[in-house]
Amino acid sequence: MTNVNANDRHHRRPCLPLPATPNGPPLENLCIKPATLIKISFSYILFVLIMFSEF
């Protein structure tokens, strides 16, 4: 059973594990997909550009 679980973990889609929060339970079970991370960073950069263009 342990070998099957290891293979499952190996063939799963790559994701970035979130760090454990100090004021709560660790978020090891949650993960961010690379596409979601790219969308978040893109929207953040867009927001920063809009904020700077106001000045």
Image: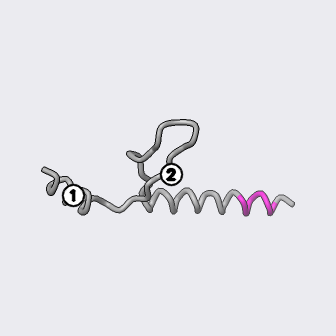
Question: What colour scheme has been applied to the protein in the rendered image?
Answer: one colour
Q: Residues within 10 Å of mark 2 (few under 14, many from 20)?
A: few
Magenta stretch holds residue 28:
no
Q: Main secondary structure of the magenta part?
A: helix
Instruction: Tell me what residue is drawn at x 15 percent, y 57 percent.
Output: 3
Residue 51 lies in the magenta stretch:
yes
Which numbered disc, 1 or 2, marks the residue that appears first in the sequence? Answer: 1
Please give the residue where the numbered disc 2 appears in the rendered image.
19
Q: Quadrant of residue 47?
A: bottom right
4 vs 16, left or right, is: left
Q: Locate the C terminus and report the quarter of the image it occupies.
A: bottom right
The picture quadrant where one finds residue 43 is bottom right
Q: Nearer the viewer, residue 30 or 38?
A: 30
Report crowding for label 1: few under 14, some 14 to 19, many 20 or more residues within 10 A (C-alpha). few
What percent of the width, then of the height, locates residue 13?
Answer: 31, 60
Location of residue 1 with respect to 23 vertically, above or below: below
Residue bounds of the magenta highlight = 48-53
Residue shown at the point (42%, 51%) measured from the top left:
31
Q: Hey, what amino acid is under mark 1?
A: Ala
| Residue at screen point 73% across, 63% down | 49
* Nearer-the-camera pick, 9 or 49: 9
User: Secondary structure beneath disc 2?
Assistant: loop
Mark 1–mark 2 distance (CA, rounded to whole Å): 22 Å
Instruction: Give the image location of residue 7, x and y in percent.
Output: 19, 60
- Residue at the far left: name it: 1
> Mark 1 falls on what kind of element?
helix
The amino acid type found where label 2 is placed reads Pro
Q: Is residue 50 left or right of residue 10?
A: right
What residue did someone put label 1 on? 6
Is 47 situated left or right of 25 in this image? Answer: right
